[in-house]
């Protein structure tokens, strides 16, 4: 049992859920950082909960035994079962069992296993975190910033005024030249406006168009581009016809185990094939690999197959049906 406890404690450092087959699951509920008031933040906390309904074998605990001891899947699974049987017998005899640093197990009046978690339990990533309060920024800083901005604006304005005065002082003003220049600008602008107002498009009848080889080629290219553009616009969208998708028909899989690595999943698949299962394979999903013995189109067939598995293979009594 001590070996079982040590593996569970180690796995809870990096996983939020560790399931013990045929016993229950240890789940960590995490509370994120909370804001309390305008400038106070409370550190994140975690809570350890035991769920007796999580009894299926997801392969995580068995894989830990395999990696640590360098043993096969069957040997590791037997060790996990032995630890669970030892824990159950100790609870039946003593009614209370210390479960390492995680807390204390008891059996209630209904015969259910109840965990009283250790209040000092904490995930390594939250260790040492405390509440934080931020100090407000003094108002003096804002006043100094406004004062510096005002000084900068005054300096820029003074530089602009000095530059303008220097330009006026160094550039001599010629009154007659200024008048002539002004009159010239007015006359030219008026002439430009008159030309624009009097401009009319010439009629094609009075000026026949000169046809050259370059013009013919240009017109043909323009007509071809316009026809291709119209054809592209008027052509029916092929994607709109192919957009209709047929409904996805889900299957029912009799899952024999869930694992994190492909290596362990392959070992489980080979073991199932050696036991006589011919349709075994697996489904890869994010963070897990579901190894199944067979797949069916309807649920009733899957249920009948699952009953045969439970009756003929007692060591696969944790097999279950997945609709995917």
Image (cartoon, rainbow, N blue to C red):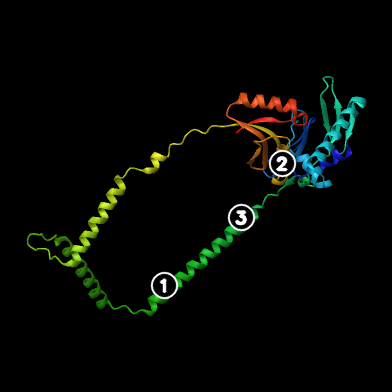
Q: Residues within 10 Å of mark 2 (few under 14, many from 20)?
A: few
> Could you tell which of marks 1 and 3 lies nearer the N-terminus?
3
Between 48 and 275, the one lying in front of the other is 275
> Could you tell which of marks 3 and 2 lies nearer the N-terminus?
3
Where residue 78 sits in the image (x, y, percent)? 83, 36
Among all residues in the image, which is located at the extreme right?
Answer: 94
Residue at 25% over, 53% down: 226
Left or right of 223 on screen, residue 95:
right
Q: Is residue 158 visible?
A: yes
Where residue 220 sits in the image (x, y, percent)? 21, 59
- Residue that badge 1 annotates: 164
Left or right of 53 on screen, residue 242:
left
Mark 1–mark 2 Cα distance, whole angstroms, equals 91 Å
Among all residues in the image, which is located at the extreme left?
Answer: 206
**Dot 1 and dot 2 residues touching (CB under 8 Å):** no
Q: Secondary structure at mark 3?
A: helix
Q: Is residue 12 visible?
A: no
Residue at 64% over, 42% down: 286
Left or right of 54 on screen, residue 191:
left
Position of residue 157 relative to residue 280, above or below, is: below
Q: Quadrant of the C terminus?
A: top right
Mark 3–mark 2 Cα distance, whole angstroms, equals 72 Å
Mark 1–mark 3 Cα distance, whole angstroms, equals 34 Å
Image quadrant where residue 200 sits: bottom left
- Residue that badge 3 annotates: 142
Q: Secondary structure at mark 1?
A: helix
- Residue that badge 2 annotates: 270
Q: Residues within 10 Å of mark 3 (few under 14, many from 20)?
A: few
Left or right of 252 on screen, residue 123:
right
Between 196 and 60, the one lying in front of the other is 60
């Amino acid at each position: 049992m001590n070996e079982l406890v040590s593996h569970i404690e180690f796995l809870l450092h990096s996983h939020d859920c560790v399931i013990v087959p045929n016993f229950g699951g240890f789940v960590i509920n995490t509370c994120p950082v909370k804001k309390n008031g305008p400038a106070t933040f409370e550190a994140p906390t975690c809570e350890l909960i035991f769920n007796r309904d999580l009894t299926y074998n997801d392969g995580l605990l068995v894989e830990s035994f395999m990696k640590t001891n360098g043993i096969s899947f069957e040997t590791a699974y037997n060790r996990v079962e032995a630890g669970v049987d030892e824990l159950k017998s100790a609870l039946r005899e003593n009614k209370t069992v210390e479960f390492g640093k995680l807390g204390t197990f008891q059996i209630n009046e209904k015969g259910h296993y109840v965990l009283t978690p250790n209040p000092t339990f904490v995930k390594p990533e939250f260790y040492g975190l405390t509440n934080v309060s931020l100090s407000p920024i003094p108002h003096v800083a804002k006043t100094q910033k406004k004062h510096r901005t005002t000084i900068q604006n005054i300096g820029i304005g003074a530089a602009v005024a000095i530059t303008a005065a220097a330009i006026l002082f160094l550039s001599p003003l010629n009154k007659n030249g200024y008048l002539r220049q002004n009159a010239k600008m007015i006359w030219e602008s008026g002439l430009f406006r008159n030309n624009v107002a009097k401009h009319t498009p010439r009629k094609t009848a009075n000026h026949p168009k000169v046809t050259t080889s370059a013009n013919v080629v240009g017109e043909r290219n323009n007509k071809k581009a316009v026809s291709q553009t119209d054809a592209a616009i008027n052509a029916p969208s092929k994607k709109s016809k192919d957009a209709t998708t047929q409904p996805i028909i889900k299957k029912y899989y009799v899952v024999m185990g869930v694992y994190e690595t492909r290596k362990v999943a392959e070992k489980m698949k080979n073991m199932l094939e050696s036991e006589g299962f011919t349709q075994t394979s697996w489904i890869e999903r994010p963070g897990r690999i579901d190894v199944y013995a067979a797949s069916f189109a309807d649920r009733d067939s899957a249920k009948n197959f699952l009953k045969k598995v439970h009756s003929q293979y007692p060591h696969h009594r944790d097999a279950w049906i997945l609709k995917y």
